[in-house]
C-alpha cells in the first residue's frame, strides 16, 4: 500500500467515526436517558428506523431538511411513548415489549417508506472542517454533520441535568429505587414514560442523521442493528452521557472500517469487516460484564443487569 | 401446566384486535379493510393452493419458534434465532464440500445433522456467554445474529460460492437425492412433518422427562434450582443447544426443500417471526404448531395482498408488529377476572383502575 492509500484509509476510518458515529451518539444518549429511569428500550432499533424514514419523508415533502429532523424526532418520540405506555401496564415486560417495538417500528417504516426509496430529499448541511488540508480524502472526511454539535450539546445537557436538576434527580431516583420515588409521592410510571419518550426523540435525531446526511437516502437496510448496539454502548459508557461521546466515536470508527477498505480497493472480507461493530460490542460486553455482579454505575432497577 | 380458558382466549382476542387495528391502518392509506381481511383469509386458508403455501411457511416458523421457546423455559430471552437459521442452512449446504455425502436418505440425514449442530453451537455460545460471562442473552443473541449473517454472506460470496451463480451468489446446489420433496406430490415438504415432530418431542421432553423438568425448574426459579443442586449452567446450555439445533434445522429445511442451495434468500426473517410465534404460544411447544400455521398463513397471504391491493410487502410485518404489541398488552388483563375486563372500556381509567397497576414492579413481571 502506498502512503496515499494509507492516508485515505485512515481518513476514511476517522471520517467514518465522525459520520457513522453520529447516529450511534444519539441512540446511545436516548437509551442512556431511558435506562437511567430504570427501563430498557430494545425497541430503539425500531425507533431509529422509523425516525429515519419519517425524517427523510418530512424533508422530501417539505423541501426542508430541518423539518425532516423535527419529523424524525417526533416519530421517534411517538413510538417510544408507546413503549413507555405498554411497560406501564402490569405484567408487561420491557424486554419483550422492546422486541415487539423493534418489529413494529421496522415494519411501519418499510410500509410507509416504500414510495421514498427513489427520490432525493434535501440534506442536512455539512460543516467543513478540513479546508486546511490539501488531501481531498482528508477534506471529505472532515465534513461534519451539522447534527453532531447538537448531539454533543445534548450529551452535556444530560450530564448536567442528571447531576444538577430536580428532573434529573427524579429520573435517577426512579431508576435506582422505584420504592423511594414512590415514597416521595412521585409516579414512577410517569417519570419513566417521560424519560422513554424523550429518549425516543433523541434517538429520532439519530434516525434523521442516517437518512439526511451523506450518503443520505432511505433504504430498508439503513440501520441493521445500530439501535441495539446502543444498548451495549450505554453499558460500555457506564450510563454516563459524556462517555457516550467516546463510545459513539469508537463504534463509528469500527463501522467505517469496511467501507474505508472498499474505498481504497480492498474488497476482500467486506462483509466480515461490516460485522466489526457487533464483534466489538460483544468483546466489550465480555470485558465489562462479570457474572453475578452488577456493572458499575448501572441503575438499580434495570431488569437487564442482574 | 395450568391452562385456563383465558390462556387460549386472550391471544385469540388480541389477534382479532390486531386484525381490526391493521384494518384501520390500511384504511388510512385508502384501502378497504374488508378487502384486506378477505384476502388475508383467502391467501392463507382459502383453497388448497393457499394451504400448501401456508404449511410450507409454517415449517420453518415452528422450528425457529422452538429456538425461543426452549431457552425461555430455562429463563433466557433468546431472540437471535435468525443467526442459527442462516448458519444451519449454510452448514447443510456446505457439508458436501467437505465430506463425500451419499446421494440418498443417509446424505439427507447428514446435511440435516450439520445444520442442527451449527445452530446448536451458535445458540450455546449465547448461553455460555450468559452463564459464564454474565452477558445479557437478549443482546448477545441479536449481535450474534448480525455476525452470523455477515459470516454467511462472506462465505457464500467467497469460499463456498458456485462460480455459475452470477447475479445471486449461492453455494453449489444439493444433489437430487439429498433434497427433501413434497408430501404425496404436493408443495408441502417433509419439513412440516419434521417441525411438528420437533414441537411434539420438545413438548413431551419438557413435560415428561426429568431433564426437561430440571430445565423448567432452572427457568422458573434459579434460586430453588441451586438449592436442590441442579447443574443450572449445564441445563441452560442444554436448552440453548436444543433451541439452536431446532433453528439450524429450519435453515437446513429451507435449503434442502425450498432453495436447494444456500443464498441470501435464506435471510427472510423467519427467525424474527419465530419470536412472535413463541410469545403468542406462551412458550408452549404444543401451542407453537397452530400458531405457526396461523402466521405461516399471514406470510403466505402477504404476496397476495401485494398483488391484489398493491400494498407494500412490509404489510405483513406491520400486522405482525401490531399483533405482538397487543399480545403483550393483553398480558395485563390476565390477572383480572372477566367482569373487570368487560367493564374496563366503560370505566375509562376512572378511579376504578385495577389494583394490580399500582402495586407491580419489575419483580412481578413475567416474560
Image (cartoon, rainbow, N blue to C red):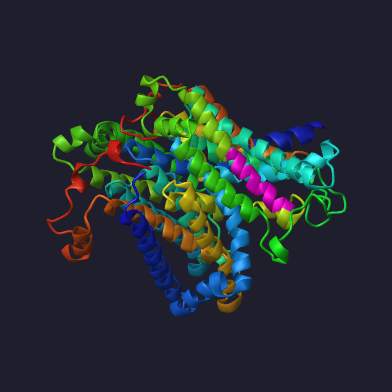
Q: Nearer the viewer, residue A7 or B300?
A: B300
Residue B242's x, y, as percent? 57, 37
Residue A262 as seen in the image, left or right of residue A40: right
User: In this rendering, is residue A157 above or below A221?
Assistant: above
Report the span colored magenta: B244-256
Q: Nearer the viewer, residue B152 or A133?
A: B152
Residue A167 as seen in the image, left or right of residue A32: left
Residue A140 visible from this viewpoint: no
Q: Residue furthest front?
A: B208
User: In this rendering, is residue A202 above or below B341?
Assistant: above
Q: Nearer the viewer, residue B291 or B105?
A: B105
The magenta stretch spans residue A74: no
Residue B245's x, y, as percent? 61, 39
Which quadrant of the figure contains the N terminus of chain A? top right
Q: Quadrant of residue A117?
A: bottom right
Residue B67's x, y, as percent? 54, 43
Q: Quadrant of residue B110?
A: top right
User: In this rendering, is residue B268 above or below B106?
Assistant: below
Residue B44 visible from this viewpoint: yes
Q: Main secondary structure of the magenta part?
A: helix
Q: Residue at x 63, y 48 (%)?
A: B250
Q: Residue furthest left?
A: B351
Residue B238's x, y, as percent? 54, 31
Which quadrant of the figure contains the C terminus of chain A? top left
Q: Residue at x 60, y 44 (%)?
A: B247
Amino acid at each position: 500500500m502506498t502512503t496515499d492509500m494509507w492516508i485515505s484509509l485512515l481518513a476514511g476510518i476517522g471520517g467514518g467515526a465522525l459520520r457513522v458515529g453520529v447516529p450511534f451518539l444519539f441512540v446511545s444518549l436516548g437509551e442512556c436517558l431511558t435506562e437511567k429511569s430504570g427501563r430498557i428500550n430494545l425497541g430503539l432499533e425500531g425507533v431509529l428506523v422509523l425516525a429515519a424514514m419519517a425524517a427523510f419523508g418530512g424533508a422530501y415533502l417539505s423541501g426542508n431538511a430541518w423539518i425532516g429532523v423535527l419529523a424524525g424526532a417526533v416519530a421517534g418520540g411517538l413510538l417510544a411513548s408507546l413503549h413507555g405506555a405498554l411497560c406501564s401496564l402490569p405484567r408487561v415486560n420491557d424486554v419483550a415489549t422492546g422486541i415487539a417495538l423493534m418489529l413494529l417500528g421496522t415494519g411501519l417504516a418499510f410500509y410507509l417508506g416504500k414510495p421514498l426509496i427513489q427520490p432525493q430529499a434535501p440534506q442536512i448541511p455539512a460543516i467543513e472542517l478540513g479546508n486546511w488540508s490539501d488531501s481531498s480524502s482528508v477534506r471529505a472526511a472532515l465534513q461534519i454533520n451539522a447534527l453532531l454539535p447538537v448531539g454533543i450539546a445534548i450529551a452535556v445537557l444530560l450530564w448536567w441535568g442528571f447531576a444538577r436538576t430536580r428532573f434529573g434527580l427524579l429520573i435517577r431516583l426512579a431508576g435506582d429505587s422505584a420504592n423511594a420515588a414512590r415514597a416521595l409521592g412521585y409516579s414512577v410510571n410517569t417519570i419513566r414514560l417521560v424519560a422513554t419518550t424523550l429518549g425516543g426523540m433523541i434517538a429520532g435525531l439519530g434516525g434523521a442523521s442516517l437518512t439526511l446526511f451523506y450518503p443520505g437516502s432511505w433504504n430498508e437496510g439503513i440501520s441493521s442493528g445500530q439501535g441495539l448496539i446502543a444498548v451495549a454502548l450505554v453499558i460500555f459508557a457506564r450510563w454516563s452521557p459524556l462517555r457516550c461521546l467516546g463510545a459513539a466515536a469508537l463504534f463509528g470508527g469500527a463501522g467505517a472500517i469496511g467501507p474505508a477498505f472498499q474505498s481504497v480497493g480492498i474488497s476482500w472480507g467486506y462483509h466480515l469487516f461490516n460485522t466489526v461493530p457487533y464483534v466489538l460490542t460483544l468483546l466489550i460486553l465480555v470485558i465489562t460484564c462479570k457474572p453475578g455482579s452488577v456493572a458499575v454505575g448501572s441503575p438499580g432497577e434495570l431488569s437487564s443487569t442482574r | 401446566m395450568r391452562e385456563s380458558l383465558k390462556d387460549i382466549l386472550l391471544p385469540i382476542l388480541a389477534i382479532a384486535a390486531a386484525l381490526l387495528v391493521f384494518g384501520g391502518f390500511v384504511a388510512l392509506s385508502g384501502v378497504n379493510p374488508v378487502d384486506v381481511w378477505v384476502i388475508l383469509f383467502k391467501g392463507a386458508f382459502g383453497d388448497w393452493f393457499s394451504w400448501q403455501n401456508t404449511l410450507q411457511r409454517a415449517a420453518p416458523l415452528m422450528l425457529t419458534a422452538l429456538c425461543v421457546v426452549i431457552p425461555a423455559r430455562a429463563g433466557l430471552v433468546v431472540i437471535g434465532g435468525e443467526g442459527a437459521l442462516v448458519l444451519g442452512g449454510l452448514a447443510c449446504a456446505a457439508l458436501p464440500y467437505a465430506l463425500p455425502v451419499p446421494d440418498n436418505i443417509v446424505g439427507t440425514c447428514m446435511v440435516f445433522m450439520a445444520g442442527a449442530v451449527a445452530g446448536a453451537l451458535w445458540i450455546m455460545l449465547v448461553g455460555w456467554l450468559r452463564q459464564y460471562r454474565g452477558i445479557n442473552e437478549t443482546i448477545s443473541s441479536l449481535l450474534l445474529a448480525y455476525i452470523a449473517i455477515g459470516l454467511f454472506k462472506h462465505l457464500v460470496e467467497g469460499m463456498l460460492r458456485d462460480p455459475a451463480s452470477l447475479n445471486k451468489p449461492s453455494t453449489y446446489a444439493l444433489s437430487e437425492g439429498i433434497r427433501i420433496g413434497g408430501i404425496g406430490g404436493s408443495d408441502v415438504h417433509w419439513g412440516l412433518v419434521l417441525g411438528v415432530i420437533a414441537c411434539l418431542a420438545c413438548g413431551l421432553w419438557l413435560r415428561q422427562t426429568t431433564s426437561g423438568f430440571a430445565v423448567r425448574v432452572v427457568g422458573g426459579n434459579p434460586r430453588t434450582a441451586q438449592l436442590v443442586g441442579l447443574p443450572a449452567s449445564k441445563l441452560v446450555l442444554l436448552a440453548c443447544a436444543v433451541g439452536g439445533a431446532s433453528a439450524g434445522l429450519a435453515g437446513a429445511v429451507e435449503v434442502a426443500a425450498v432453495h436447494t442451495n444456500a443464498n441470501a434468500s435464506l435471510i427472510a426473517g423467519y427467525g424474527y417471526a419465530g419470536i412472535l410465534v413463541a410469545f403468542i404460544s406462551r412458550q408452549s411447544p404444543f401451542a407453537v404448531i397452530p400458531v405457526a400455521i396461523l402466521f405461516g398463513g399471514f406470510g403466505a397471504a402477504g404476496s397476495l395482498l401485494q398483488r391484489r391491493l398493491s400494498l407494500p410487502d412490509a404489510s405483513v410485518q406491520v400486522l405482525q408488529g401490531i399483533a405482538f404489541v397487543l399480545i403483550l398488552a393483553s398480558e395485563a388483563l390476565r390477572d383480572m377476572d372477566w367482569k373487570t375486563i368487560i367493564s374496563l372500556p366503560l370505566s375509562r381509567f376512572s378511579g376504578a383502575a385495577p389494583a394490580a397497576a399500582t402495586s407491580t414492579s419489575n419483580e412481578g413481571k413475567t416474560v
